[in-house]
Image (tube, rainbow, N blue to C red):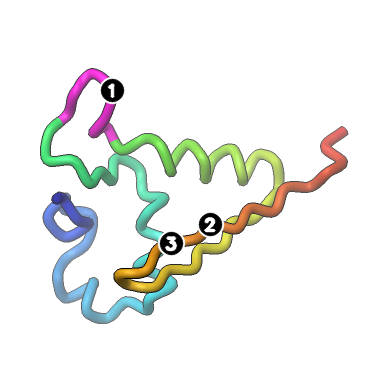
Amino acid sequence: MMGPVLNGLISKEMGNKMTEEDKLKLIFSPSLSTKDEITDISGRGVGMDAVKKERERLGGSIRIESLLGKGTTFIFKIPTNLS
């Protein structure tokens, strides 16, 4: 599995100094992928980056809660009045 260090997004030293919150924000980095190879349907690393851009466009927020070995929850807040 490719991670941010192996993918060249951050150095190992940077990763060691980052807070857990900062590490979770890496999920939204352009071209971050957990796939070792690109296929016709996956591995390009555009999914969560696209979510972040749309959230910014709408003026909403995303919070991530994660427990190692237990799971991850994404909490989205989107304004109801977008007119």
Q: Is residue 25 magenta?
A: no
Q: Is residue 73 left or right of residue 15?
A: right
Q: Residue at x 62, y 45 (%)?
A: 56
Give the amino acid at mark 1. Ile
Asked which secondary structure carries label 3, the reply is strand
Q: Residue at x 87, y 41 (%)?
A: 81
Residue 65: image x %, image y %?
49, 68
| N-term mark: 3 or 1 | 1
Residue 57: image x %, image y %?
65, 39
Are the residues at dot 2 and dot 3 in contact (C-beta closer than 8 Å)? yes
Judge the density around disc 3: few (<14), some (14-19), many (≥20) Cα neighbours within 10 Å: few
Which residue range is magenta in the image? 38-44
Are the residues at dot 1 and dot 2 in contact (C-beta closer than 8 Å)? no
Asked which secondary structure carries label 1, the reply is loop
Read off the residue under disc 3.
72
Q: Which mark is residue 19?
A: none
Read off the residue under disc 1.
41
Are the residues at dot 3 and dot 1 in contact (C-beta closer than 8 Å)? no
Give the amino acid at mark 3. Thr
Asked which secondary structure carries label 2, the reply is strand
Q: Is residue 3 above or below residue 16?
A: above
Q: Residue at x 54, y 40 (%)?
A: 53
Read off the residue under disc 2.
74
Q: Is residue 61 left or right of residue 68?
A: right
Tell me the quarter of the image containing the C terminus.
Answer: top right
